[in-house]
Image (cartoon, coloured by chain):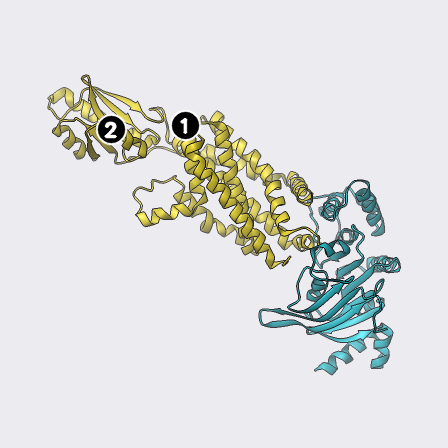
Amino acid sequence: MRTGALMKRIVRQFMRDKRTLALLIAAPLLVLTLMYLVFNGDTYKPKLGLIGMPEPVVQQLEAYGAAVSVFEHADDADAALKDGRLDAYVTLQSGGTIVKLEGSDPAKNRAITMLIGRMAQKAAPSAANASLPAPEFQYLHGSSEMTTFDSLGPVLIGVFAFFFVFLIAGVSFLKERTSGTLERLLATPLRRWEIVAGYILGFGLFTGIQAVLIATYSIHVLGLMMTGSLWLVLLITLLLSVTALSLGTFLSAFANTEFQMIQFIPVVIVPQIFFSGLFNMESMSPWLRWLSHLMPLKYGADALRSVMIRGEGWNSVAFEIYLLIALSLFFMAANVLALRKYRKI
Amino acid sequence: MMTVSSGCVDVRGAVKRFGGKEVIRSISLQVERGEIFGLLGPSGSGKTTLVKIIAGIDEATNGEIYLLGEKLPKLAMMNRIGYMAQSDALYAELSAKENLEFFGALFGLKGSKLKARMQYVMELVGLGGHLGRTVSAYSGGMKRRLSLAVALMHEPEVLILDEPTVGIDPLLRQSIWRELEALGRSGTTIIVTTHVMDEAEKCNRLGMIREGRLIALGTPADLKNQTGGGTIEEAFLRYGGGQE
């Protein structure tokens, strides 16, 4: 009941502070729209699998800058494609060339289509054997219409849900301390965990609204590619927000002013964005890549990508979902402990 | 006067250290039920730390604190203590009513009881007509009075006020003291810190604190007589001087 009272108070305060409410809800939508307008593709060195190709074709493709590996059977190549070891494989079937693409990254799709296109053009004038018959493109995920925004969109949803919630929750909790109201709360029978739980529930309501708005706006208004379950997307976005909420309120214990809270952005938020999948991590050294496993945002972004682009279901994102729940609980517990600084019981 | 029968608040050898620094140096004192007890001392003398320990928010490094017979700190005792800090500690975005509702709910008040208490405390502090106003529209003095009203919501048996009249005009200060005296008569024990000498005169008994030590304890009249001075201020200076 006391937690309920706290939750009600937070909701009321939020309704008065329209500007913060607008930041939480409108800012992510605005930034996503900008990203949608700005993003254009770039080039990439594709990983290509070849089945039963003549040697000159293999050499020519390598000369064009592809990382080529040769397979005996289409099944092996398919498996490699699913694991992400290949971006595409090429095979000859009844006189035609079949190009099967993994398809979830449009930049890679474009690079491969261009590469194969050049091979096919060569066929006409010289009729050399380093050429291919007119190719047919198939996609494991995505399609030829997929844009960079489709591919980055799920990550961006995660990033903005995380960033704005982290900041607003952190500053609000901090304000409780600087205004002296925390001391007053601690002069009541309110338990420390009840304070943390009240904050999660009160803010959780607004982050829930934010999650619904961001996801539906991106999918229905901006036309972001969506092949999986909307409910899963909402669940993952919400969990990511709750993680940001618990992390933000916890870290605010280590800031004395709002400005110090802002200083957590380059330390806590920006590295997570780098590792979230917005940038290709395959060129990164392995030990650095390992860091990404420490970042909550990466798990949320990976799960969103799986659901939205690859259309995968509960089983393939269950690990990420449980991990986000575990991280939230961990940060909440840490916050309950951090509050010991102000009252032992 | 110095011995205690009912023993509402009993501080026994309280010591508080922050890091290596001793802020409270073995203070012992008792406050009787229904008494207005003043803690007088310059800023930085340890008054706030001491009242936070008595309010059960902070914990003494050494020594024992008993409040109404129960050893502190204890969460259940929070229901019987009212605490008003130096800062107003109100939610400026909310109305006075919403602030009172919130803190009342934390103490388990609800329904008609909550409403009745809200009306009562607001009348008591003279804000009866301003219940629906947003706190950010309140003047400094009104905020201070609302802060007192919040501390009174759950009918605490012990009321602890940390510099309740700081930054308040003399007229308002007088009205707040009238309220405190009325509460004291109705049986509420009040511990109040101050560094204003004429306020100290209004307390039933006084404890003088300097550099974390209790340097004198007694009624204002006793303290003045013992030092042969005419005012509390002179008494305070005399006791303080004796320590150095």
Residue A132 picture location, percent across and down: 17, 23
In the rendered structure, the answer to whether residue B14 lies left or right of residue A255 reads right
Question: Identity of the amino acid at label 2?
Answer: Tyr
Location of the C terminus of chain A by quadrant is bottom right
Where on the picture, by quarter, is residue B172? bottom right
Q: Would you name the residue on which mark 2 appears?
A: A89
Q: Would you name the residue on which mark 1 appears?
A: A311
Residue A51 appears in the rendering: yes
Instruction: Give chain A's shade.
Output: yellow
**Mark nearer the N terminus (1 vs 2):** 2
In the rendered structure, the answer to whether residue A318 lies left or right of residue B127 reads left
Residue B71 picture location, percent across and down: 72, 63
Let me know if marks 1 and 2 both belong to one chain: yes
Q: Secondary structure at mark 1?
A: loop
In the image, is residue A167 above or below residue A33?
below
Question: Identity of the amino acid at label 1?
Answer: Gly
Label 1: how many Cα within 10 Å (few below 14, some 14–19, many 20+): some
Residue A27 picture location, percent across and down: 52, 37
Label 2: how many Cα within 10 Å (few below 14, some 14–19, many 20+): many
Residue B227 picture location, percent across and down: 82, 81
Q: Residue at 33%, 24% (x, y): give it.
A: A144
Q: Which chain is cyan?
A: B
Q: Residue at 84%, 63% (x, y): give it.
A: B33
Q: Secondary structure at mark 2?
A: strand
In the rendered structure, the answer to whether residue A333 lies left or right of residue B117 reads left
